[in-house]
Image: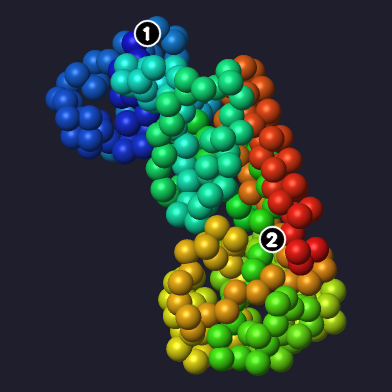
């Protein structure tokens, strides 16, 4: 049995036409028919019913189709891994990141144990769903990701909890405070990403508002962080929340950034890894994440607003 025979079988089963399958495979129709016949002889079953005007799968063909697809998926995974090994050594670590990691990425790299000092990092800035998909596909070794609590098929290591900072118009009376009670924002519309886009963030903020005694009033649709901040700074009534790393990049004098008094609203940052990550690499990254958590906890302990 040859892998190309499985490829031809899958193509014909999806097209239900030998001619269209041949066009899709960029080969002649006789070759497709011949190889599928050989596969049927080797398996000892007929895969297709050719007796009518249309080609249809036999019950045996229907039953074997999922296994055929799994074989091709395994071939794709093998090819991806082979390409990776051919172009880089084992010490290369490819990581998906967001544009708002800031100094926390430095903290992560600083926390690597001595055993990881020779690791060469390659970073790709991608949106969160793409980061997770790339880790699952084996095209990334890991990804920093917020806004999830589970990721089927992946191993999640907790790195830190981001305490969100309130962004207000600098001209608002509350902007003169050193810090805020969340309840003081009850009369202002909240500008936040939709629940569909980030359910963990939306639900966490909504629950914190309810604990503070009010139901958040949603303002105009969230237009991305920079656009939303620009609209708030230009006089649009409302407030939003900013990750600490993103807050460090906000330079507009029209925006005031204030911490919350008492228990902060936090979102967890994870490092997403393949479920089959090598034990030595997992051990290295677990040690790194523990060190980062200790550093973040130490910063929180010395914060003047706690």
Residue 217, above or below 49 = below
Relative to the observer, which residue lies in front, 193 or 232?
A: 232
Q: Quadrant of the C terminus?
A: bottom right
Marker count (numbered): 2
Q: Few, some or many C-alpha atoms within 10 Å of disc 2 (few <14, some 14-19, many ≥20)?
A: some
Q: Is residue 70 left or right of residue 304?
A: left
Q: Locate residue 31 relative to residue 268 in the image: left or right.
A: left
Q: Residue at x 71, y 35 (%)?
A: 290
Residue under the image location 37 percent in, 8 percent down:
1
The picture quadrant where one finds residue 4 is top left
**Element on which disc 1 rests:** loop
Q: Which residue lies under the disc numbered 1?
A: 1
Q: Spot the residue most to the left.
A: 28
Q: Secondary structure at mark 2?
A: strand
Q: How are the residues colored?
A: rainbow
Q: Nearer the viewer, residue 97 or 19?
A: 97
Label 1 neighbour load within 10 Å: few <14, some 14-19, many 20+: few
Tell which tag, 1 or 2, sits nearer the viewer.
2
Looking at the image, residue 271 lies above or below residue 284: below
At 64% from the left and 69% from the top, the residue drawn is 165
50 or 18: which is nearer to us? 18
Position of 37 with respect to 71 (left or right) is: left
Looking at the image, do the residues carrying marks 1 and 2 touch, with CB atoms under 8 Å apart?
Answer: no
- Whole-angstrom CA distance, mark 1 to mark 2, is 57 Å
Residue 56 visible in the picture:
no
Question: Where residue 191 appears, x then y in whole percent?
Answer: 58, 79
- The residue labelled by disc 2 is 163
Label ID, residue 107 = none
Above or below residue 296? Residue 254 is below
Q: Position of residue 111 (x, y in %)?
A: 61, 33
x and y, in percent, of residue 224 in the image: 47, 71
């Amino acid at each position: 049995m040859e892998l190309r025979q499985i490829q031809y079988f899958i193509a014909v089963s999806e097209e239900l036409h030998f001619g269209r399958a041949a066009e899709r495979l960029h080969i002649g129709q006789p070759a497709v028919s011949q190889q599928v016949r050989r596969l049927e002889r080797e398996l000892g079953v007929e895969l297709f019913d050719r007796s009518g005007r249309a080609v249809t799968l036999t019950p045996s063909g229907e039953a074997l189709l999922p296994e055929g697809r799994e074989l091709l998926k395994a071939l794709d995974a093998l090819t991806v891994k082979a390409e990776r090994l051919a172009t880089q050594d084992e010490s290369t670590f490819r990581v998906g990141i967001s544009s708002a990691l800031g100094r926390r990425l430095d903290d992560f790299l600083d926390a690597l144990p001595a055993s990881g000092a020779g690791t060469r990092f390659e970073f790709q800035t991608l949106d969160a769903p793409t980061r997770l998909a790339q880790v699952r596909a084996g095209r990334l070794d890991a990804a920093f990701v917020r806004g999830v609590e589970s990721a089927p098929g992946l191993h999640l290591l907790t790195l830190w909890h981001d305490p969100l900072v309130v962004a207000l118009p600098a001209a608002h009376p509350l902007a003169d405070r050193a810090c805020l009670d969340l309840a003081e924002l009850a009369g202002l519309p909240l500008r936040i990403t939709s629940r569909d886009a980030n359910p963990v963030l939306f639900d966490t903020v909504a629950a914190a508002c309810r604990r503070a005694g009010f139901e958040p009033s949603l303002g105009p649709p969230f237009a991305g962080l920079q656009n939303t901040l620009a609209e708030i700074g230009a006089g649009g009534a409302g407030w939003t929340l900013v990750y600490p790393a993103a807050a460090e990049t906000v330079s507009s004098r029209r925006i005031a950034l204030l911490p919350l008094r008492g228990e902060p609203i936090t979102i967890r940052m994870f490092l997403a890894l393949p479920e089959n990550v090598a034990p030595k690499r997992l051990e290295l990254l677990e040690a790194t994440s523990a060190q980062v958590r200790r550093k973040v906890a130490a910063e929180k302990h010395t914060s003047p607003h706690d």
